[in-house]
Image (tube, rainbow, N blue to C red):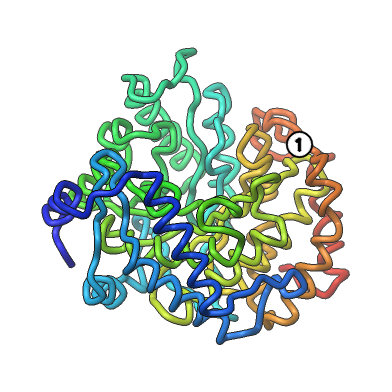
Amino acid sequence: MISFYEILRRTEEGPHIDEREFDLKVVASESRRLVREYDIRFNREEIVTSDDSLADDVFKAGFELALKAGFLTVDSRRVIKLSEEEIKEGLRTAPGELLVGQGADARLLYARKVEDSRYPVIMGGQAGAPIPEEFYYQMAISYMQEPIVDTINNGGLAEVKGIEVRTRSPAEALAAMAELRYLREAARAAGRPGIHLLAGESSVTCIGDLAAQGEEFLRRTDAHLVPVLNDLKTDYDRLTKAFTFKIYGGFNVALVDPVVGGFLGGPEGVAVGFIASYLLSRVIYMSDYYIIHPIHPKYVSTSTPETMWVLNIVGQAMARNSNFILMGDVWTSNGAGSREVFYEIVANTVTNVATGSHPLGVSATNGKYPHASGLETRFMGEVARAAVKLKRSDANEIVKEFLKKYHPERMDRPDVGKPFPELYDMKTITPKGWWLKMYEEARREVMDIGLKLE
């Protein structure tokens, strides 16, 4: 693998190009060419595809895009280009297994295969959401006390001690440290002090990451996000995150979240862009595992036919052609406290598990409001374990059946549910009776269609 110093040199000496030209003449032009050349087509009747050759073609197209495009460094307007051999070296050296967390709470995070019969690792939390400080601790416990939850990726603090967390202000450092203190305290209270955390979400810049490196905060058995900027871009801040945390000894997680309909094009081009982003981030960020998060231009959610198809084909392309460890985001438009949130969870989770990814969620209300809890993540885990028994064709039928229960009506007008304190008893950290009843009804509905929950 090339060194951080060589990557840094390429940010200063690589080919020069204006950002707009990169967007149009490289990303947009090449992604469209590759989609046509490989005849990649989205089929809304086959959200979970059984076509192995399609998955392989998406991977090949993504490899070509990675080789052609590289990552644009926004600050310097220089492109970090990789050779074919450098990309292949990243593929060869990618870890297929990671031991994350500590002691009895450690888990083996592994690269799943298509129709993998092993239980997936369940990552719980309302990732990406702004969570009020007054109930951050209790909300974190609600996930950590669920035995089915293996690892945690909760949201961040939008305010700390009443002070807004502004980008590049000292509040980023203080908020990131406070977030990790709450998570550590919650882990101890739940009896899981060594649980793996993907954390530091209170800070969008490297300020919080640098402040939170330490055994009291982010341990070497924990992880943080290193986003790929849309589309196929990075900057000095993201590179600082990647370099320093890898030198510290923790796990880098590449977050890729392109918008369907952006410069990469429709779901087909977005899928190709995902592959390219993963291959490049493996070398440039030295990423250890990866998040699939396609964004719908209207609904945001990963629960649409287009975004679930992307989850499916990217998962299969990587599972068939690499040892990359993938986490599929479960972002729902409906919130905890609604019936429809369970339907979205089923569709998303079955898609992810059948096609090579571990599920991460649930980020209800698309991470807009703190309307989430550990209960719907328990449900996600139960569905995930049942889904390992499915063939892709059966998974596709289940996904389409549950899609009809919320799309498009409950995506145009989602039920955002209720905030955490209205879902759980804040003293006992247990679900309120009405919310528990709704969960039990959802379980019965899932089992009625033949998916056997434990």
Asked whether, in this view, residue 135 is left or right of residue 27, the answer is right
Count of all numbered marks drawn on residues in the image: 1
Residue ID at (35%, 29%): 177
Q: Position of residue 324 (x, y in %)?
A: 40, 70
Q: Is residue 16 left or right of residue 252?
A: left
In the image, residue 301 sits, relative to residue 69, either above or below, namely above
Q: Nearer the viewer, residue 292 or 338?
A: 292
The secondary element bearing badge 1 is classed as loop
Horizontal side, residue 198 vs residue 400: left or right: left
Q: Is residue 392 above or below residue 5?
A: below
Q: Is residue 123 visible?
A: yes
In x, y percent, where is residue 302? 64, 54
> 193 or 320: nearer the eye?
320
Whether residue 216 is visible here, answered yes or no, is no
Q: Which residue is mark 1?
A: 416
Residue drawn at 62 percent across, 54 percent down: 330
From the top left corner, tell me how far across and down residue 421 is, in percent: 69, 28
